[in-house]
Amino acid sequence: MTVRCDRVWRNARLATMQAGLGEIEDGVIAAAGERIIYAGTAKDAPNFDAGESVDCAGRWITPGLIDCHTHLVHGGDRADEWRQRLEGATYEEIARSGGGILSTMRATRAASEKELIAAALPRLDALLGEGVTCVEIKSGYGLTLEHEAKQLRAARALGGKRRVAIATSFLGAHALPPEYRGNADAYITLLGDEMIPAIAESGLADAVDGFCESIAFTPSQIERVFLAAQKYGIPVKLHAEQLSDSGGAELAARYGALSCDHLEHLGEAGIEAMARAGSVAVLLPGAFYFTRESRTPPVEGLRRAGVRIAIATDCNPGTSPLTSPLLAMNMAATLFRLSVTECLRGFTIEAAHALGRSQDCGSLEPGKYCDLAIWNVDRPSQLVYRMGLNPLHARIWRGQ
């Protein structure tokens, strides 16, 4: 039987991300339109009548990488605050003195939507240059409806500037804006009564996120945000247990959170709650490294409980100005002791689960989008092993 398709990649080695890495020697991938119709061994493949046939010369193909936690759209940078931290100031001290997220808020508010897009494009291009085909982008630096919506529109617009899938998260509960200093509950009321309804009506956000921490919002305040998101049918995520164990992960799990992110201080109760809810643990080694943290996430506990583990760059101006998923994987292996398999799955199929998109991307399977990264490596471990070398040969998005 002859099967018609638009494009076929032959003479490839595949890491399908099914059952571990799902390695296949002498593999073939075929695409019709934007979707994969075959991914498997050459001997089992049907005869393809393809519009284009690509000889991969034995190169490895993985799913396109997925960066499931970024703050890619923002104004300004925080290089001077980083200098202060090198000189001994803590993240909390800088935040409480008006720096941190609020300094980026001021720069973001001052920037136009066009300026935010222009500033984000080089960061996005760096990710795409290392095989990324899907990126999550959070708001959280506007802290008013006007400026949060501006950030989200800029994030959506990036998907029209480049061949990449963009997922957006509304992070209005990122920090307390100066207009509400000393009155966090009133700001939470604004989020629930005005901002989330407006964002939901506009269709600008795929998820609602929050920052549950001593320098941000309490669990009871975040629960009010989740209740508002639930009312409008928007999935939730949470920055949780980064600086302390506040019970944020347990709260997020009760609301079926797609993911809980950071998690350096996650305790057993939080792990068990995430396991029951199916929430993904998104580890962010760039932030751990850049802020010189010493307490690592409880990786062994997450493994024992069967919690999915994803990895992301957390690209942001204050705590992780990282635009290299390859380096993030190396950091996850070196600093958190993740295996090669966990690192590669963490930037593919587990990241897809963290975004609620595993039905469309994250592994090489018929029916999923044909999002591929083709690599000049001898074996997959080299993608995690090397630092500063980009072996990407080609990036395929939606079959092209």
Image (spheres, rainbow, N blue to C red):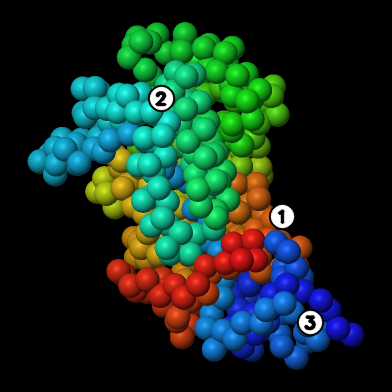
Residue 49, numbered label: 3
Secondary structure found at label 2? loop
Q: Is residue 361 left or right of residue 325?
A: right
> Residue sitting at 38 percent across and 57 percent down?
126
* Outermost residue to the bottom: 43
> Residue sitting at 65 percent across and 47 percent down?
356
Q: Is residue 229 visible?
A: no
Q: Is residue 360 above or below residue 266?
A: below
Q: Could you tell me residue 149's position as x and y percent?
A: 51, 26
Crowdedness near tag 1: few (<14), some (14–19) or many (≥20) residues, C-alpha within 10 Å:
some
* Outermost residue to the left: 87
Cα distance, mark 3 to mark 1?
27 Å
The residue indicated by pointer 2 is 142
Please identify the quarter of the rendering in which residue 11 is found. bottom right
Identify the amino acid type marked 2.
Gly
Mark nearer the N terminus (3 vs 1)? 3
The residue indicated by pointer 1 is 359
> Residue sitting at 44 percent across and 45 percent down?
70
> Residue sitting at 79 percent across and 82 percent down?
49
Identify the amino acid type marked 3.
Asp
Q: Could you tell me residue 273's position as x and y percent?
A: 60, 41
